[in-house]
Image (tube, rainbow, N blue to C red):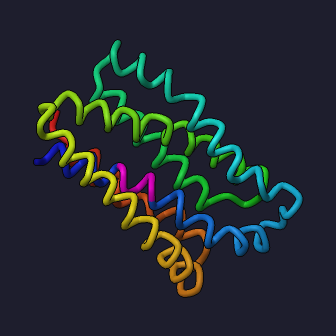
Amino acid sequence: RLVTAALVLAMFLAALESTAVGTALPTVVAELGGVARYSWVFSAYLLTSTTTVPMYGKLADLFGRRRVFTVAVALFLGGSALCGMATSFPQLILFRAIQGLGAGGVMPVAITLIGDIYSLEERGRIQGVFSGVWAVSSLAGPAAGGLITDFLSCRWVFYLNVPFALAAVIILPP
């Protein structure tokens, strides 16, 4: 249960990031002034997260799933924090790429861990839980992104991931 909770938290942070940033990005663009490179904020994240998935699979086989998962969450966490501190649009694009490097390992390694932990009979139920995480975050993410942008700052949308990432790494047993 502890491992499942950690994996659910990690999936939630990745899913929440995908949905909350879209709401806050117009404000980020206005603040940092990068309308011409607007699409690169999404593209840098998607390119790095997509292209690193096979690498994470191999690394997880070689060095252990927990270790690789922890590194992926740490990269995602570091990228999120750096995005919140970005002072220019090129920095934001670079930091989103770093965040994507971590995201490329969070979801596939989490799903691999599920396959390792649960029997074939249990996997369907657990996959339902993880699908539910995406459903909840697709509803909560844009609302949270808008509220955080309105009441705090658009930068806090990136910091939103920090507690979830820390909790996921802390509660994942060795």
Residue 124: give x, y in percent of width and height.
21, 43
Q: Residue at x 36, y 50 (%)?
A: 11
Residue 87: give x, y in percent of width and height.
72, 60
- Residues 42 and 151: in front is 42
Query: Measured along the vertical axis of the image, is residue 147 above or below residue 82?
Result: below
Q: How many marks?
A: 0
Quadrant of the rendered structure where residue 106 is?
top left
The verdict on residue 43 being magenta is no
Residue 116: give x, y in percent of width and height.
20, 27
Farthest-out residue, top: 62
Which span of residues is magenta-colored?
11-15
Query: Measured along the vertical axis of the image, is residue 102 above or below residue 92?
Result: above
Q: Residue at x 60, y 29 (%)?
A: 51
Residue 110: give x, y in percent of width and height.
32, 38
Query: Measured along the vertical axis of the image, is residue 40 above or below residue 29?
Result: above
The verdict on residue 13 being magenta is yes
Quadrant of the rendered structure where residue 136 is?
bottom left
Query: Measured along the vertical axis of the image, is residue 103 above or below residue 55?
Result: below
Q: Residue at x 63, y 48 (%)?
A: 96
- Residues 105 and 89: in front is 105
- Report the magenta stretch's main SS: helix
Quadrant of image for the C terminus: top left
